[in-house]
Image: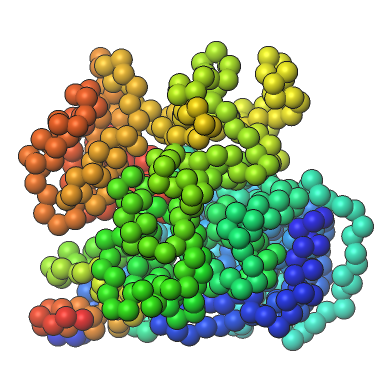
Amino acid sequence: MKLIWGIEEAFSRYKGKSAVSRLTPPGSLFTLTYDQIERETRRLRRFMIQQGMQSGDLSFIYMSKSPQLVATLVAVILNHGVACCLNSRLRPSQVLRLCSNAKPKFIIVDQGALMNIMKSKEAMGEGFPVVLFLGERELPADWIGEKVGAGVRIAKYTQGGGTSANLTQDRDDHSDSPAYCLFTSGSTGIPKGVLISGNDLYRRAKTEIEDYELTDGDCLLSLLPFSFDVGLNQLFSCLLSGAHLILLNSWFPKDIITAVGSVGITGISAVPSIWADMITYPKGEEFDKKTKTLRYVTVSGGDLNKNQLLSLQAYFEKAKIYKTYGQTETFRTSILKPWDFERKITSVGLPVKGTQFFVMNEKGEIAKPNTEGEIVHYGAGMMLEYLDDRSGTEEKKRRIPEALRPILGEGDLIYTGDRGIMDEEGYLYILGREDGMIKTLGYRVYPKEIEGYLLEYEQVKNAAVIGIQDGHKGQHIVAEVVPKGELDMNGLNAFLRNRMASYMIPEKIYVVKGLPMTENGKINYPEIKGRYEKRGIL
Amino acid sequence: MELTEVEDLVRKIVIEIISSEKDVGSESVTVDGDESLIEGGLIDSVLAVQLIEECAMKFDILIHPVELSLENFDSINKISQFIRIKLNGGEA
């Protein structure tokens, strides 16, 4: 499998070069070199095989972000297993539920995660995955062995205690078998496991290396979890290009800027909420000196509005900005490159190399330019399938309909559920989620558009718009806004009335201290919606 | 307000956030004063915002963006020190 060859080649080529570091601000680094990661993955692979790991086995990895986590997920992949990092924010009850739904063979944990899940050990029954513990601490005697709770086995890994299990070369290619499982974020109901092949992971990393022009001289800042496609891909592009990945467990602007200055970061991949905080943060002394190494930043997993994007460019004057759009099921669908940034600022760009997309109208045809429809993705980046969910897979990933085959050929399409338009030059514009679309007085309105207007108002720091069902009228538009300091409500209302069609103006605007976020830093709309629906009020 | 009082209240806020996140009773959560909260992964970057908002509200202080960093917020002790200085009218 190309991914495995690529990683092994990187080990032998970059040897003593720093691969992954964990940064504890202001400047303390714990680093593993490519050599050290290789040695650690060998030890881990032997341990995993000794515990019964076979090709194709699913392993959950429930650990905090560290160089050890990187070695662990690479070891699972090199063993031809399927790795799945769980977000550290999942509650023990959610982890247990995922275990009983997805039935992984192993759950690999560090100290903190083990303590977390052991709190619910009564709930672990027969069929609970084997727990591989990678921590230092001695465990209570009654935790080790065959019977913890109702039949759970915990095995403890010791770095020195090498085993003799053979790392036999698996001659099968496994190219199109799953190598990784990503869970879609919980904001859309029950998380679904998305299976991705090793070959696709390889292609994704290679494309990113090309797009961001990565070399072994780069030093990238990792802020996003490996349970999120963008965070994961940054890791693989780093390993395959010989770059150095710096793990930082803080999203505070001050810590990020200090990190950039102290290790000479050249690229940052982040989500909009991180940048929204950054652009309002005072630059302070020696900002230009601290950030002089920064070549590029990316905006992924959502969009910023036009003003915020311009502020971001003004903030990091010398850095290039890349905007990307995609879903867990499609990885990245489109990219807006720096040279198009100003001209097409509100779009998410053109197809990523190897992928295609089009906008499909209600009749199932390819929509004309500048007309609205559902965004459909095909080509590279497509998931293999959902984990144990055939009907879900059939709904999301379908064969190219007969009528479109003369144009698109044979193959599959992913229906994104996102609404968008494409302009004459092929640039894509996102309108919003199909299920977030608000129908009011016969009009179709997208939260994103209204949020854009709200954010244009000086005193508004963040905003979320939802539709609440009303029997007669369709939906009521409700907005939550986070003020920067004081908020002049009359001023805001007048501002909106001057800019928006009357049917788009929110009926109620609530001032809140903060918006609920998903673990990936996106606005958690279902939670906001739930609040108003539960209260039954407007 | 004495430092120990500040510490007690900060500890209460921290434990409430962790226990509601981890879905366990607050009596089963123990956090050392020096234990790393954000860097150590007990509280993630998104929850950290909630922690800071709670502190600002309960102590009735205004926290500037420039004061948000691991240096000031990564442990109960650090947060308490920071808040004490704020309450005494200083710039942390």
Whole-percent x, y for residue A14 in the image: 73, 76
Whole-percent x, y for residue A237 in the image: 64, 61
Would residue A127 be visible to someone looking at this image? no
Whole-percent x, y for residue A103 in the image: 68, 50
Towards the viewer: A178 or A243? A243
Split into 4 quadrants, where in the image is the N terminus of chain A?
A: bottom right
Towards the viewer: A161 or A168? A168
Whole-percent x, y for residue A123 in the image: 56, 56
Q: Is residue B92 left or right of residue A283?
A: left
Q: What's the image's color scheme?
A: rainbow
Whether residue A283 is situated above or below residue A176 in the rendered picture: below
Towards the viewer: B78 or A172? A172
Split into 4 quadrants, where in the image is the C terminus of chain A?
A: top left
Would residue A431 be visible to someone looking at this image? yes
Q: Quadrant of residue A46?
A: bottom right
Q: Quadrant of residue B2?
A: bottom left
Q: Is residue B6 left or right of residue A114?
A: left
Number of marks present in the image shown: 0
Whether residue A373 is situated above or below residue A224 in the rendered picture: above
Residue at image point 68% right, 55% down = A206
Residue at image point 55% right, 39% down = A350
Residue at image point 16% right, 80% down = B91
Whether residue A394 is situated above or below residue B62 in the rendered picture: above
Whether residue A322 is situated above or below residue A343 in the rendered picture: below
Q: Is residue A344 left or right of residue A209?
A: left
Residue at image point 61% right, 27% down = A395
Towards the viewer: A538 or A498? A498
